[in-house]
Each structure stands twice: as structure tokens, then as C-alpha cells.
Amino acid sequence: MHPFTDNTADLIGHLGEKQLLQNIRQWLGSSAPPSPLGMGDDCAVLPGEKRHCRLATVDALVYNRHFDDSTHPREAGTKLLKRNLSDIAAMGGFPQYALVGLMLPASLRLEWLREFTFGLRDEAERWQVALVGGDLCETKTTLGGHLTLLGYAERALLRQGGQAGDSILVTGDLGGSLLGKHLAFQPRLREGQWLAARNEVNSMIDVTDGLLKDLPELIPPGCAAGIDPEKLPITEAARQCALSSGKSALHHALGDGEDYELLFTIEAGTDLDNFIREWREHFNTPLKSIGRLTTKSREEPEGEIIDLQNGKALGLAGGYEHFRKA
Amino acid sequence: MHPFTDNTADLIGHLGEKQLLQNIRQWLGSSAPPSPLGMGDDCAVLPGEKRHCRLATVDALVYNRHFDDSTHPREAGTKLLKRNLSDIAAMGGFPQYALVGLMLPASLRLEWLREFTFGLRDEAERWQVALVGGDLCETKTTLGGHLTLLGYAERALLRQGGQAGDSILVTGDLGGSLLGKHLAFQPRLREGQWLAARNEVNSMIDVTDGLLKDLPELIPPGCAAGIDPEKLPITEAARQCALSSGKSALHHALGDGEDYELLFTIEAGTDLDNFIREWREHFNTPLKSIGRLTTKSREEPEGEIIDLQNGKALGLAGGYEHFRKA
């Protein structure tokens, strides 16, 4: 069967990435077990030894999608690993082993590949990750690859675990990542490990598609999330983007994606001031409380994000979504 | 840096895959530990629990390289997993968990993706592999992906472990894989597990690049391998290929690749007739003794493959090699 078609009714671009993933998981049936063992969280949580569980995650990096001609190849190399490190961080885990599959056109500069590899090496050394497996595959034009990262956690922090009344917090600040942070970000591994060791933290995700797309993953059934836009930590880059885009800095902070910050919930009744004070003893990374999980009111759709200042739904065109053409 | 160049002196296509892999491992330095923990065998062998070690391997599948328009998408889906299963088989291991990263153009037929996914599912169910992780990435034109397969072994059979005097055996028959076996092959998992449980079997690899390219991996330092061409099991497909290629069926059996058969050594002094008799009690898969590891004579280059019938080097243009343009 020829794989491609011009008939828009039949092509995958007709669906968004989310719908496509749902289809694939449905087609896979029982061979794809549900989260936490299987797909649906930042990492798969596999049975481990002693009191540890094992973590596994896979992520891609592709030329002209995740980096371009303006990117130093070392930064592209670090980014391939850092995207996966951020997934391990979002579980509160420790990274250990990486396997890298690269797709390379024969016309690739050897120097580019060397610098890319150096970037991968530098980031692996920084976190003591061993690169234990690899595959090279020649392609006609696509330059990119997949990295599978294996690790472990003493307590794996899942996306689901919060409940109505819990506070919502986020590390760092959000928006405008394309101006540089999408390459320069530091995966929040130490922060994630510290958070997973705190029992009052009960759910976590990393912000990759934009707060408005990632936060719903933390909302339990029958609940909504209330966010105070004035409390949202906004990058200087988001304000810069707003100057030229005609959109607000808030819009960029909510929807740009590639922030690689940790978004998590803390159970109701926790002394937040004290929690943040303890955080500051360990980290320079900013930490802000931005809202709370709520029981949804009858009018609100499930999983909705509400503006706490006016009670209305917080929405915009949405975070970045692959594939969708319409 | 723009990644591509027309200057042949500077592009990766100037090197073959083997040299390129050597370069990458050198650039990675100590972040890429040597085999068996790291790259260099069919799987990475990671520390495990109890008396088990853990296995991890990654392999690619790309349109117009590993399959084409004539391939049913279900066969493409099974092949992505089977290529990795064959690597686990080559260690004598048991597969457990898979993570799949797909690169898909937006113009892909939804029906193609569904059938591909069904193929992946069917093969996963056959071997009770759980698909626990996935990633979708949009590309302009490349259709393909990487699968990382995790498993375990009680005794991981490495490529290095044989010595001069050992017999060389191969399962199934070789050559002409492009006529169908490259899609229809059965990964030799049960066979590999049985072999790893036999102490007299001391090294193993799966034949993916052709016997002449894969056998050298089993030859220990200071040794050579003697092969009796008349004993080589040759497929009917290799004979068919020979009719149109102008090359011999033996040439195809030695160099075509994608056989996915197990090639292994048995220590000197083993009663081979008895070994093969026991094999036949368990498997219908053919098994043949085709030669032996020898101490290399002074004139022979290390790692050479010798024709036992005339004492000359067995060579041809070589198995398939990615990237190389010259």
C-alpha cells in the first residue's frame, strides 16, 4: 500500500496529535497497558527492584522542528537528551541509561555530527547518564532521532494524584521559549527529585506543550483548575514576543510550550509559605503558587481551566499541536 | 550551522556506517561505556536483579529502506518489532517492554497507520511484549521510526566468548532475503534462549548484514574463521537471485543480509552430532555446522574468514553498508 494520500479525509493530518495518539492506543489494545505501567504519563513506570521502580521514556528531535540552521549542533545534541531528562524530572526520577537512534542523510557534515555528539556527551556527563545503545539509519532528507532514557524513582510522581482543594505550583517562568529557552533550558531533575520526596506533593508534569495544554493532565475527574493570571510567572521573552505578535505576554506564557518547567499540585492544608521557604533553601529556581484544583461547577466542562479573577474559562487557540492541518 | 554540504570530503557519506559508528563512540568518550554494558553487542547488558541481567536495544525502520510500497503496512509494523526481537534473541534473552518513536508525514494515510499499528500489536502479543511508551513526531517526508526493546536474560550470550577450535553453527538458511524473508522472518527467540542455557555455546550474533560482515564479530583476537562453503545453508531465494544477478547463490548467501538467523560458536570437544540431535527434539528450525574458529596463520590478517576448501580468503564486495557513497 502506498502510504501517502492527498485525500484530506483519509490522512493523519486531519487529526491532531492528541486524537492520533488516542487512536493508536486504541488500535494497540491490550498490548499497550494503561498508565502508570504504560503510555499516558511522562514516563512508563516499570516494576523495579527493592523499593525502586524503573522509568522509561522516549522523545524525538528533528531538524526544522526542534532546531534549525541557527542552532549550534552542540545545543541540538544537548536538547535531544534534555527533553528526555525533563520527562524523568517530571516523575521525580533519576536518569541512568540512554539509547539513541539517529536518522542521518548522507549529505550531513561530519563536523555537524561531531559537534552534535559532543553536545550529547556533555549533557550525559553532567547527569552521569551512560549512553549504552545506538543505531544509525540513513534517510533521504530527514535529520533527527529518538532517544530512549531509562532511570528509576523511589516514588514516581504521576500526573494523576491531586484532588479538589490542592494548590497548583510551577517552577521557573513561562512563555517565549523560542527566543532561546527551548535550547538553553535546564531539566529540573534535582527539583523533581526533591518534590517527589515530599509527601504533600501529589501530582506532577513538565510543561512542554504550554500550560493550558499540560495542566488538564493534572485535573482529576469531576474537577477543574482555577488559575490566577496575575500570579503566573511570565518570562521576559514572552513580553518580547508580545511586542511583535500582537498577542499578550500572558497568551505566550499560557500557550507557547517548550518551557520544560515542573507543574505540580500540593495537597490542601499545606503551609505554602513554609513549603516555598524550604524550597528556597535548596534551589535558586523560582517557585510560584498559581492557583488550585476545584470541584467543577455544574456549568463548567470537566477538566476546564478557570480564570480565578472572573470565573470564566481561560482559553486561547491552544498550545502547539503536531500534525493538525485544519 | 547548516547541517548539510556538497563537499564530499566533509560529509558523513564519505565514511561507511562502521567507521561512522567508531567515530561517534570515540566522540562520546567515557559517556559511552564499552560492551557488554554499552554499545558493541546486539544488546546492552545492564545490571539486573537476582540472577538476571537486563537487556536493551534500539533499531530503526524507514520507508524505502526497510520496506516500500509493495509492503503491507502490517508487515512493516511487525518488522519494526521483529528486528529488535532478533537482537534480544541473539543474546539468548526474553523480551518484555517496548517504546516506539514514530516519524510521520502529515500526508500519511490513516488506514496505513492503523494497519501498521495492528502489525506492531500482533507481534507484541505473540511474544507478550508490552508497548509502554511512545512518541509521535511530524516530518516533512520521512516515514519511519525507532523501537527500543527492553528484556532480560539469565545468561547473556555475547559476541565475544569463542576461541580457536570452536565450531561455528548457523540456524535456518541464508541469502536472497529481499525476495520476502526480510519481512516474513521469525525472530529466533526460543532458539536463542535454548542456546544460552547450553554452557558449550559460548558466543552468538544474529545475521543482519550478511555472514561475511557479521561473522568477524565472533572472531577473538589473534584468530580467524574457517568456513566450508559447501556446508553453508543456502535459501531457494538466493538461488533465484543468482539467476538474475549473474552472481552465485553462495555470493548471495554470504552477503545479502537481513537473514535474522543465529550464528554462534560451540566449544571444541563438543559432540556436535549429539548437540544437533538434541536441537531437533526441540526445534524444526534447521541447524548446521559450517566451520570453525582457527588460530590465524602468519599470512592471514586478523579476523579474516578463510575458505576451508582451498585455504584462501572468502571475500566479496561485502554485506550491505549504510551511508557509504564511494
Image (cartoon, coloured by chain):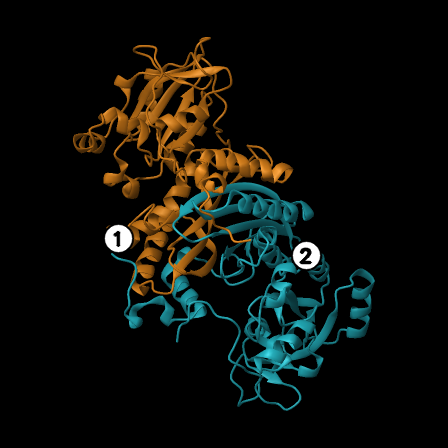
Chain colours: A orange, B cyan
Q: Is residue B312 above or below residue B29?
A: below
Chain ID, mark 2: B
Viewed as shown, does residue B223 lie left or right of A135?
A: right
Q: Is residue A311 above or below residue B123?
A: above
Where residue B235 sits in the image (x, y, percent)? 68, 72
In the structure shown, which secondary structural element does the residue marked by tag 1 occupy? loop
The residue under the point 65% across, 55% down is B93
- Cα–Cα span, label 2 and label 1: 44 Å
The kind of residue tagged 1 is Asp
Viewed as shown, does residue A98 lie left or right of B45?
A: left
In the structure shown, which secondary structural element does the residue marked by tag 2 occupy? helix
Q: What's the mark number on residue B27?
A: none
Where residue B139 sits in the image (x, y, percent)? 40, 49
Viewed as shown, does residue B296 lie left or right of A58?
A: right
Residue neighbourhood size for the residue with mark 2, other residues' Cα within 10 Å, grouped as few (<14), some (14–19), many (≥20) = many
| Residue at the front extreme, as displayed | A7
The residue under the point 35% across, 39% down is A187
Residue named by callout 1: A69
Q: Nearer the viewer, mark 2 or mark 1?
A: 1
Chain ID, mark 1: A
Residue A311 visible in this rendered orientation of the protein: yes
Q: Which quarter of the rendering shows the C terminus of chain A? A: top left
Where residue B228 sits in the image (x, y, percent)? 67, 83
The kind of residue tagged 2 is Leu
The residue under the point 34% across, 13% down is A312
Q: What's the mark number on residue B189?
A: 2
The residue under the point 24% across, 41% down is A180
